[in-house]
Amino acid sequence: MTFILCLDGASKDPDADRRKGADFARRALEVGGDDPNVLANAAVALAFFGEDIGAMVGLADRAVALNPGFARGWYVSSALRLWAGQPDIAIEHGEAALRLSPRARIGNSLAVIGRAHFLSRRFNEAVPKLLLAIQDDPSYPEPYRSLAACYAHLGRLDEARTIVARLREITPLVVPGFTQFRTPEHRELLLSGLRLAIGETT
């Protein structure tokens, strides 16, 4: 999906991919009716591209209401709640996704849960979840960013720099804008941690 390219820093033209991704998601909603998979995937893409987060949470809620056993829907709801500034609900919904699908790859729920603990400043609880998220999918950049920021805020700068070095092997985009996070304090917590991790003092 184009939003994954933008999220991971792999897009060669982020602006064009954002427009294309949002257009594809809107078209899918037009033809997808009440398909929970379409609702969930369109919601997460459109939320990432800047659409109203409350409306996108509503789409994810609708997907889960249509199919309460839909693990992907619970994962998307978890990610959206995190972006909306509701980390505790994000943890609940991420844990629901893991219970429903502990092995199938429906999204990295551990990364969302770890980041939710991080954004709640429960850094010591975030670390093991983020380490497991990296173990689960070593090619996914997001838990590396969160873990590096987490280590930095804990004062474990050597470990933070080691994680940044591993992140650079995956993507050149170490410090993204985190625009999907609608709460300014959450964005700043991530950004300040990553800046510390890469040795920036301002």
Image (spheres, helix red, strand yellow):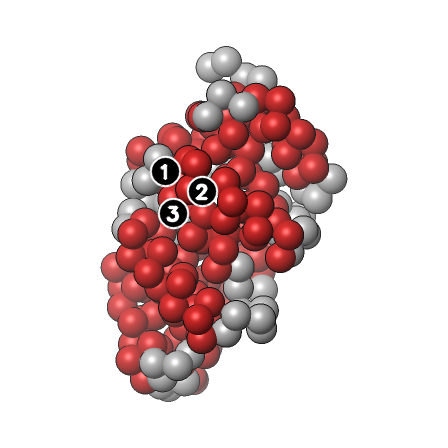
Residue identified by numbered label 2: 126
Residue identified by numbered label 3: 116
- The answer to whether the residues at label 1 and label 2 have Cβ atoms under 8 Å apart is yes
Q: Residues within 10 Å of mark 3 (few under 14, many from 20)?
A: many
155 or 199, nearer to the observer: 155
Residue 186 lies in quadrant: top left
Q: Nearer the viewer, mark 3 or mark 2?
A: 2
Residue 43 x, y percent position in the rendering: 39, 66
Among the two numbered marks 3 and 1 on one chain, the one whose residue lies closer to the N terminus:
3
Q: How many marks?
A: 3
Q: Residues within 10 Å of mark 1 (few under 14, many from 20)?
A: some
- The answer to whether the residues at label 3 and label 2 have Cβ atoms under 8 Å apart is no
Is residue 10 something one can see in this rendering? yes
SS at mark 3? helix
Residue identified by numbered label 1: 122
Horizontal side of 19 relative to 62 (left or right) equals right
